[in-house]
Image: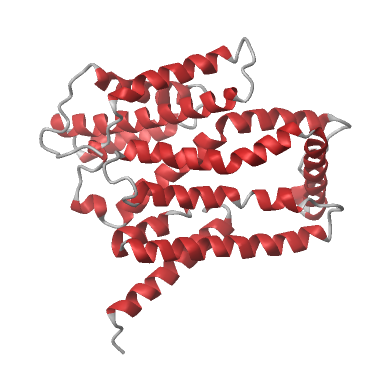
């Protein structure tokens, strides 16, 4: 049987939507769950992409509803507000992917669309963060319920659960509050990094880079973003000495996002220089493999990332002339 073009599009949309949900559900492939959606956008365009976004989010709602029913039977007084709040994260990620791809702002560079996607996630999660932080009772409820869920997992996970640490009185609460501070400083950055990685990988798998190998090399952070980046990091350093309230979470997340963007620009410059000076495939593979290994070395990984980001920042003063032959920048 010969499939019509419309049926092929429908089948591909359903299949890639199901694959995105499978990646999300498997856990160890969670960080790639938007790649099938990006591939669909590149291959089939806007309408199938938007349909897939709706189907995937509906799938999240159904899966979360089933989890609520299962956990409610085990944990006393479980807050539906807290359990439903994590639907905001996939909603923000899917909405962010749409912002990066769609021509809502056709004249806006990709860098600004990425920042808008991070802003969307911050806006969606902001009310939940504000409600929890302003209510000591709700914060205590969160801690108690997380402790109950932790103990439930520890008791039912067999040998793996036996290896999990058992906390003394008050120890779980202290650890939880410290973890929450770190999370609030970094979560928007983390999900923006996830979004950008899925965007690049999806483009590559869809053959977009094969048709246009210079795409990554055309990634450029606008020079006007330099001063906001410096101000954000000045604010982040200020938090080491004085409290600036909720603004602390904004400057840390924005500062880390800017480091990420400049690091991508640094990688773009490296690729351009490899081409200019005729680096062969073997030498490139050795350099890339060494960099990947360094990412797993504590302390050295920070030096590597900051070094690549500083290379990206250097383009504000050093003229690499990357765009003379590669067309317009992203």
Which residue is located at x 70 percent, y 27 percent? 178
Which residue is located at x 42 percent, y 26 percent? 259
Relative side of 147 to 96, left or right: right
Compare residues 85 and 130 and report the one nearer the observer.
Answer: 130
**The image quarter in which residue 217 lies:** top left
Which residue is located at x 28 percent, y 78 percent? 5
Q: Give x and y (percent) for residue 127.
A: 64, 40
Compare residues 3 and 188 and report the one nearer the observer.
Answer: 188
Quadrant of image for the N terminus = bottom left
Q: Give x and y (percent) for residue 171.
A: 82, 30
**Residue reaching furthest to the left:** 325
Quadrant of image for the C terminus = top left
- Examine the rendered structure and indicate whether residue 135 appears above or below residue 14: above
Which residue is located at x 48 percent, y 28 percent? 254
Compare residues 152 and 38 and report the one nearer the observer.
Answer: 38
The number of numbered badges drawn on the structure is: 0
Q: Give x and y (percent) for residue 111.
A: 34, 36
Relative side of 64 to 273, left or right: right
**Residue reaching furthest to the top:** 241
**Residue reaching furthest to the right:** 169
Q: Give x and y (percent) for residue 91.
A: 54, 52
| Scheme by which the image is coloured | secondary structure
């Amino acid at each position: 049987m010969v499939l019509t073009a419309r049926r092929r599009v429908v089948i591909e949309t359903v299949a890639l939507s199901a694959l995105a949900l499978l990646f999300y559900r498997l856990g160890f492939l969670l960080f790639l769950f938007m790649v099938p959606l990006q591939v669909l956008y590149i291959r089939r365009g806007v309408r199938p992409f938007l349909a897939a976004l709706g189907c995937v989010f509906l799938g999240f709602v159904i899966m979360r509803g089933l989890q609520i029913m299962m956990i409610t039977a085990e944990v006393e007084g479980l807050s539906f507000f807290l359990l439903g709040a994590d639907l905001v994260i996939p909603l923000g990620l899917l909405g962010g992917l749409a912002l990066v791809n769609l021509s809502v702002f056709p004249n806006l560079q990709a860098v600004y669309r990425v920042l808008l996607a991070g802003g969307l996630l911050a806006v969606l999660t902001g009310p939940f963060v504000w409600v929890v932080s302003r209510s000591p009772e709700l914060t205590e409820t969160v801690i108690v319920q997380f402790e109950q869920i932790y103990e439930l997992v520890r008791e039912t996970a067999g040998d793996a659960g036996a290896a999990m640490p058992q906390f003394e009185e008050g120890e779980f609460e202290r650890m939880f509050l410290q973890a929450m501070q770190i999370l609030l400083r970094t979560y928007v950055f983390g999900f923006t990094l996830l979004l950008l990685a899925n965007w690049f990988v999806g483009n590559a798998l869809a053959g977009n880079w094969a048709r246009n190998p210079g795409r990554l090399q055309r990634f450029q952070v606008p020079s006007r973003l330099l001063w906001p980046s410096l101000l954000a990091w000045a604010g982040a350093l200020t938090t080491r000495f004085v409290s600036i309230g909720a603004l602390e979470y904004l400057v840390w997340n924005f500062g880390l996002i800017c480091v990420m963007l400049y690091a991508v620009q640094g990688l773009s410059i490296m690729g351009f220089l490899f081409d200019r000076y005729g680096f062969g495939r073997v030498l490139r593979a050795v350099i890339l493999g060494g960099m990947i290994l360094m990412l797993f070395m504590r302390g050295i990984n920070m030096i590597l990332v900051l070094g690549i980001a500083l290379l990206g920042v250097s383009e504000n003063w050093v003229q690499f002339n990357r765009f003379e032959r590669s067309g317009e920048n992203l």
